[in-house]
């Protein structure tokens, strides 16, 4: 029988920031678990509409992914001409997201690391394994890309041309998720981090922190009981909405929606206003040991 969970949250953790609130404490809100929703920012897709909304199949991949440091585009099965226009669109979004973060989060600017950009043309795929299914509540952790304690900050934008929202579900605070699943998390085997790196399975060394984050991700997605009974709030992001979120700590699921951009940044926790709010420090407190 499902047991009622004590609610430590009474409303969805979404903070709305309009252009009229230029001095809002964006970093503090994000660091303490809010999704920052910007309803009135402009990003014009009209110059790219042909390439974006043509039927660009994502080539078996969930998303089209772009590396702004090399200019390489992956996952788009399309003609060379369409690929070139798609690359231009995604590169434009990467620059736009970088400028936005520079404006809203000046304290992070010197430390933020620009990572991949993605184009998400399709709605959630129904044929995925539980662990790959982002319609299930989770925190982000990347099996092949250890972050070694750095934060994962993502900037999303819904550019759907048909009025369709992107629908998310937001969950409980990170510490609650961690308290629930840490007791059954498998620790990293001794020397496993070095071995995974040498075999090329991970880019960089998987740390004890990365291992625990992967375990939280996997256990949450694997658990039908958690998915059915964990506290959650459903939130719709309409076309034209932009939202920023630390997806390593905000429990989230993408229920549906087509045509969104996303830009990923890594942030060393030393650049946070309050490191104690990071998942690294939270997990170190809960386990009583250093994890990187
Ligand atoms: C996710 O990070 O779980 C997916 C978010 C999205 O595509 O909207
Ligand atoms: Fe996610």
Image (cartoon, rainbow, N blue to C red):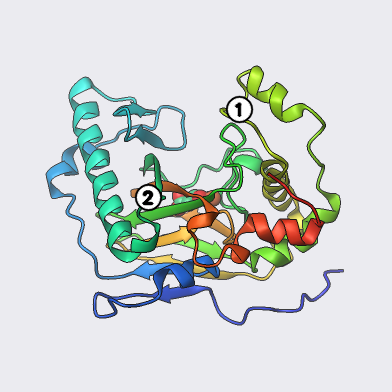
Query: Closest to the observer: 102 or 225?
Result: 102
Left or right placement of residue 28 versus residue 227 in this view: left
Q: Return the residue at label 2.
A: 258
Dot 1 or dot 2: first in sequence order is 1
Q: What label does residue 202 carry, if any?
A: 1
Residue 112 in the image: x percent, y percent? 40, 49
Q: Secondary structure at mark 2?
A: loop
Residue 22 in the image: x percent, y percent? 27, 76
Per the model, the C-alpha gap separating discs 1 and 2 is: 30 Å
Vertical position of residue 40 compared to residue 254: above or below: below
Left or right placement of residue 2 versus residue 124 in this view: right
Say whether marks 1 and 2 touch (CB < 8 Å).
Answer: no
Vertical position of residue 214 compared to residue 39: above or below: above
For the N terminus, the quadrant is bottom right
Residue 258 in the image: x percent, y percent? 37, 50
Point out the frontmost of discs 1 and 2.
1
Label 2: few (<14), some (14–19) or many (≥20) C-alpha neighbours in 10 Å: many
């Amino acid at each position: 029988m499902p047991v009622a969970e004590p609610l430590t949250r009474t409303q969805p953790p979404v903070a709305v920031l309009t252009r009229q609130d230029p001095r809002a404490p964006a970093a503090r809100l994000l660091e303490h678990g809010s999704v920052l929703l910007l309803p009135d920012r402009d990003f014009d897709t009209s110059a790219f509409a042909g390439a974006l909304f043509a039927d660009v199949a994502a080539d078996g991949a969930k998303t089209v992914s772009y590396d702004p440091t090399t200019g390489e585009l992956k996952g788009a099965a399309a003609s060379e001409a369409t690929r070139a226009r798609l690359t231009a669109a995604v590169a434009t979004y990467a620059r736009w997201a970088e400028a936005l973060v520079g404006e809203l989060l000046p304290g992070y600017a010197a430390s933020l690391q620009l990572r991949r950009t993605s184009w998400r043309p399709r709605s959630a795929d129904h044929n995925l394994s539980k662990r790959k299914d982002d319609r299930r509540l989770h925190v982000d952790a990347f099996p092949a890309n250890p972050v070694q304690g750095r934060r994962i900050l993502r900037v999303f934008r819904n550019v759907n041309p048909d009025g369709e929202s992107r629908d998310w579900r937001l969950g409980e605070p990170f510490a609650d998720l961690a308290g629930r699943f840490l007791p059954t998390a498998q620790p990293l085997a001794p020397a496993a981090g070095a071995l995974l790196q040498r075999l090329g399975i991970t880019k960089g060394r998987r740390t004890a922190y990365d291992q625990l984050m992967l375990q939280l991700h996997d256990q949450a997605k694997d658990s039908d009981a958690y998915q059915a009974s964990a506290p959650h709030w459903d939130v719709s992001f309409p076309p034209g909405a932009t939202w920023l979120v630390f997806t390593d700590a905000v429990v989230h699921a993408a229920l549906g929606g087509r045509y969104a951009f996303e830009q990923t940044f890594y942030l060393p926790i030393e650049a946070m206003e309050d490191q104690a709010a990071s998942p690294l420090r939270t997990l170190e407190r809960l386990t009583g040991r250093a994890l990187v």
